[in-house]
Image: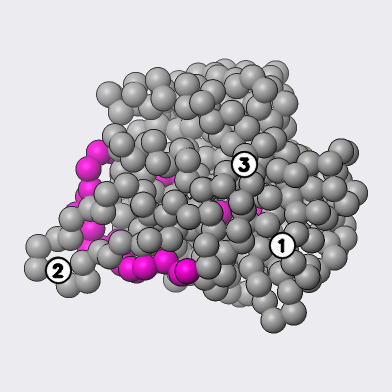
Amino acid sequence: MARRIEVTGAGGVRLVAWEFGDPPKPIPDQPGAPEEAGRGPGLAADGQGARAGEGSRRGAVPGEGGVRGALSGDAGAGGAAGGDAGPGGVVTGDVLAGGAGAGVLLLHGLMGRASHWASTARWLSGRHRAVALDQRGHGQSEKPPEAAFTREAYVEDAEAALEQLGLGPAVLVGHAMGALTAWQLAAKRPDLVRGLVVCDMRASALGAASQREWADWFKSWPLPFATLADVRKWFGEDDPWVERPNPARGTFYAEVMHESGDGWRPVFEPEQMLKSRETWVYDAHWEELTQVQCPALVVRGLDGELGRAEAQEMVRVLPRGQYAEVPDAGHLVHYDQPEGWRAAIEPFLDGAFAE
């Protein structure tokens, strides 16, 4: 079960967080008691969900930025495979009374959404208060054209989520862009972060060529798609960036599409994704790693985008860094090998929460 919670991010941008597990108790005499959401964040921004319907297999998605893998058939956070019903209750963070267990905030990568963490969040919710955030411009969170898509804005959004939901000090679990946000927040607000999991994100600069490739790639999308089957086929087979047919890649993109008046389009604005990406690709981020004082685990898939040498250097730079790698996994480690992912991070989480 997942519940939708509204958070106010930097600049007043409205964000949506999803809490997994039993609903926390409302504060006594506080109006607006939480309601259960029967369907979770596997839904598009207008309540139109993409029916994933396929099992999780490995798949390649380009760049930082992309996500390797796909949602499993039940990956919608409410247990439905991206159904069409909208989520149930909407509550603000200030009506929550803490919930059971210590807090974990899960941050997806570029073009991702909170539902990508559904499987991880479900097992976490047995012992911890697990919340996944649809970051600005993503999922069901607001996408105002005038909003800032800077590193500072993303970090402040995560900071606001921790404070408004009463999660801190929490463990931050981030994938790709979400991992960068997580370690930048850990450096900025050590009082809010007790542990950090960095999943397949590079600290080195990617460069201008990478950004140009992404801009050209977005332009190549044959929007709108007539059907979700067309989405799966193009991203799984016909996309020039696909080296070999990859059904899981198609399924991933079907999950981040919604039905509009003329066909199926992404729930995000590609231009906003490029704005988000350009705020980190030109710079390296080693200095922020040196400022992270909490325990930190760097996780990579053996076939992911973060190489072993760079990952081990990140561990060396982190004051309290640890290293884990997951065999037979690519960029989206937690989808490629969910059991291996859990085995890699669970001992670390136990230690972080024991401190």
- Side of 344 relative to 68 (left or right): left
Q: In what element is the residue under mark 2? A: loop
| Camera-side residue of 76 and 317 | 76
The disc labelled 1 sits on which kind of residue?
Leu
Per the image, the residue denoted by label 3 is 55
- Side of 241 relative to 193 (left or right): right
Residue at the extreme left: 29
Per the image, the residue denoted by label 1 is 228
Q: In what element is the residue under mark 3? A: loop
**Residue interval drawn in magenta:** 85-113
Residue at the extreme front: 53
Give the Cα distance between marks 3 and 2: 42 Å
Quadrant into which the C terminus falls: top left
Residue at 27 percent of width and 49 percent of height: 22
Mark nearer the N terminus (1 vs 3):
3
Q: Is residue 175 above or below residue 354?
A: below
Q: Residues within 10 Å of mark 1 (few under 14, many from 20)?
A: many
Give the Cα distance between marks 1 and 2: 43 Å
Q: Are marks 1 and 2 in contact (CB under 8 Å)?
A: no
Answer yes or no: is residue 230 visible: yes
- Side of 308 relative to 163 (left or right): right
> Residue 99: where, in percent of width, then height?
23, 48
| Camera-side residue of 74 and 268 | 74
Q: Residues within 10 Å of mark 3 (few under 14, many from 20)?
A: some
> Residue 184: where, in percent of width, then height?
51, 42
Q: Is residue 69 magenta?
A: no
Per the image, the residue denoted by label 2 is 30
The disc labelled 2 sits on which kind of residue?
Gln
The disc labelled 3 sits on which kind of residue?
Gly
Mark nearer the N terminus (3 vs 2):
2
How many numbered marks are there? Answer: 3
